[in-house]
Amino acid sequence: MIPSSITRRRTLLALGAAIFPAVPLAAATWDGGGGDGNWATPANWSTDLVPAGSEAATISSSVTVNHNSASAFTTSGMLILGSGAGVTSVLNVGPGSGTLQFGGDGFGAAARVGDAAGNGTLNLSGGKVQIGTGLAGNDASLNLATFSGAGTTGTLNISGGELQVGRRILIAANDGSRVGNVTLSGSGVIHMVATGSAGEGDLGMLRLGSGISTLNFDGGELIGRGIRQDAASATSAI
């Protein structure tokens, strides 16, 4: 019996899938190839596309990146800013900017500002940065100088616009030499949406870890459930 055209197509598709398996999306790493320092310029990314889909957006070189486009960009991957010993990476999101949204599962895929002995700084003076895809349920966290590497530094300066975080902001954790700084001023908003289970002890919290944490409030609005200090040995100032 001669197989139908539909059967032949299915057989070829199955063979193709076996020979050429699906390739996972690589992380989009900043290489600055566009020369203008703008997040929205595709040539500035290793993929020659602005991070999208499930790609992680990784900035692991000493560079200042600006998001000053009205366009919104969304990826369900994480943000890694300032990763690697001796690296200082700065992301500026200014007035008139569209939303940057990053996903994650709350722990392993949370956003990292300051990572692996590097220095990361997020300056938000307009627009919106969302950590969490959909901002629903047990959503993603922002880790500020917490993930790996002694001497890692992470800084948030929120003077305008809004930072939305689905779960928590964890600051200077897991190593006494890690440094986290948060400054909220002007018309800036930090909103920990906290839509998960109320039984989760750090949901909606600014959580200060075992390192060196400094919180500066001079205007702006903090929406969340509170501030939690993890370790009596930590160095913290509010």
Image (cartoon, rainbow, N blue to C red):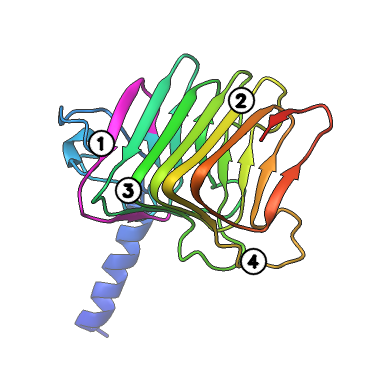
**Residue sticking out furthest to the right:** 232
Q: Position of residue 165 (x, y in %)?
A: 52, 54
Q: Is residue 221 left or right of residue 137?
A: left
Judged by depth in the image, the label closer to the viewer, 4 or 3, is 3
Mark toward the viewer: 3 or 2: 3
Instruction: Give the residue drawn at x 61%, y 51%.
Output: 168
State the separation of the CA atoms marked 3 and 2.
25 Å
Q: Quadrant of residue 36?
A: top left
Which residue has dot 4 on it?
196
Residue 117 lies in the magenta stretch: no
Which mark is first along the chain, 4 or 1? Answer: 1
Instruction: Give the SS element for disc 3.
Output: strand
Mark toward the viewer: 2 or 4: 2
Counting residues from the N terminus, which is met first, the one under dot 3 or under dot 2? Answer: 3
- Quadrant of the snapshot with the N terminus: bottom left
Q: Is residue 36 left or right of residue 213?
A: left
Residue count near mark 2 (Cα–Cα under 10 Å), binned few <14, some 14–19, many ≥20 = many
**What residue type is disc 2 on?**
Val
- Residue at label 3? 126
Q: Secondary structure at mark 2?
A: strand
Q: Which residues are magenta?
A: 59-76
- Residue type, numbered disc 3: Gly
